[in-house]
Image (spheres, helix red, strand yellow):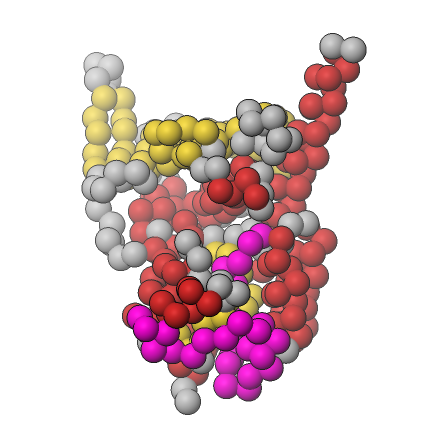
Amino acid sequence: MTAKQNIALVGCGSWGKNLARNLFNIGVLHTVCDADPKILDVVKKTYKVNICVNYADLISDPNIKAVIIATPTHTHYSLARLALLAGKHVYVEKPLARGYLQAQELNHLASVKGLTLMVGHLLVYHPAVNCLRQMIFRGELGEIRFLNSDRRNFNQQARRDNNVIWDLAPHDISMMSYILGLEPAGIINACGWSTNNDSVIDVAHLDLNFPGDIPAHIHNSWIDPQKQVLLTVNGSKKTAVLNDTRTENKLELYSINDDGSVTVEPLTYSLDEPLRLECEHFVHCIESGEAPRSDGASGYQVVKILEEAEQKMHINSRELALRFV
């Protein structure tokens, strides 16, 4: 059995099924583990791979070299830790953990054991995002002055496991960090609202600062029926807009002419599926020992910023409540 034929997927639900498809298509899907027998029946018929319901059986299997975890957020830390302790390479869907100390421990454990730890920050594998990163690094936008990311949809199911920033903001934070080549210096401000009166924040605004005094804003929402996935990067020369809800011309470059008119330039990039590229990258890192583009350290940084933002939200909420006492 070769190294490319022994990766197990844990969790084959709404997102895990996309991972299963891509892992199968690149020839690495060995086993699927899920608690739902109906899901496993579909997997068995579709892919004709091994199935199991017991995670302990999976990580004790010497034929399985790596584990991909696509389960609810609150399980990420415990499942990833057990897999690393069992000597398996690990890919965890975002976020890496629900607290920065847990994320830090996982990163340290992978390093000590010489294992690959990768986080599912999908957008750092998106061809359009990589095209934008290259333009920024070449200086085509000039000095970066501001970033704004709007990520909104209508999602009630995610409330059971997260609030909106833990669900959506990992995409925004990891993408901004990647295209700038910088980790956030910290959270300037954060506010959020629970519109469903269940104490679960479903609308949020985050203000971040990157080294070099580059400000950034993130707007996340679960209550918007019109899906929006829009990143704007303002530079001193040009502004880039990445609209991921479009089927074509997702990435455009805007420049203001001397007469005040605006020139819009659509940019070309690979049309490869980001998730396939991400899965292939995980396999490559296992085989080469190369650090993943979205490694444990970057996963830790994202979790640290999320935890800081959540704490800031709670402080702001208490201060607002005191004003009306």
Q: Looking at the picture, how far across and down is residue 6, in whole percent? A: 44, 80
Q: For the N terminus, give its image quadrant.
A: bottom left
Residue 126 visible in the current orientation: yes
Total residue callouts: 0
Residue at 32%, 73% (x, y): give it.
45
Q: Is residue 162 left or right of residue 13?
A: right
| Point 73% across, 17% down: residue | 321
- Residues 52 and 295: in front is 52
- Where's the C terminus, which quadrant? top right
- Indicate whether 17 appears above or below 221: below
Please indicate, yes or no, whether residue 68 appears anywhere in the rendered image.
no
Q: Is residue 286 above or below residue 20?
A: below
Considering only vertical position in the picture, is 200 above or below 104? above
Residue 62: say if magenta: yes
* Residue found at the far front of this picture: 38
Q: Is residue 102 magenta?
A: no
Q: Nearer the viewer, residue 267 or 223?
A: 223
Residue 131, given in percent of the width and then of the height, sits at 32, 48
Q: Position of residue 226 (x, y in %)?
A: 34, 29
- Work out whether residue 53 or residue 264 is closer to the camera in this orientation and state it: 53
Is 21 or 66 nearer to us in this picture? 21
Q: Would residue 191 be found to the left or right of residue 311 on screen?
A: left
What's drawn in magenta, residue-wise? 44-73
Quarter assignment of residue 207: top right
Q: Position of residue 134 (x, y in %)?
A: 35, 48
- 6 lies left or right of 313: left
Residue 320 is drawn in which quadrant?
top right
Residue drawn at x 65%, y 70% is 82
Residue at x 68%, y 49% (from the top left corner) = 99
Residue situated furthest top in the rendering = 324
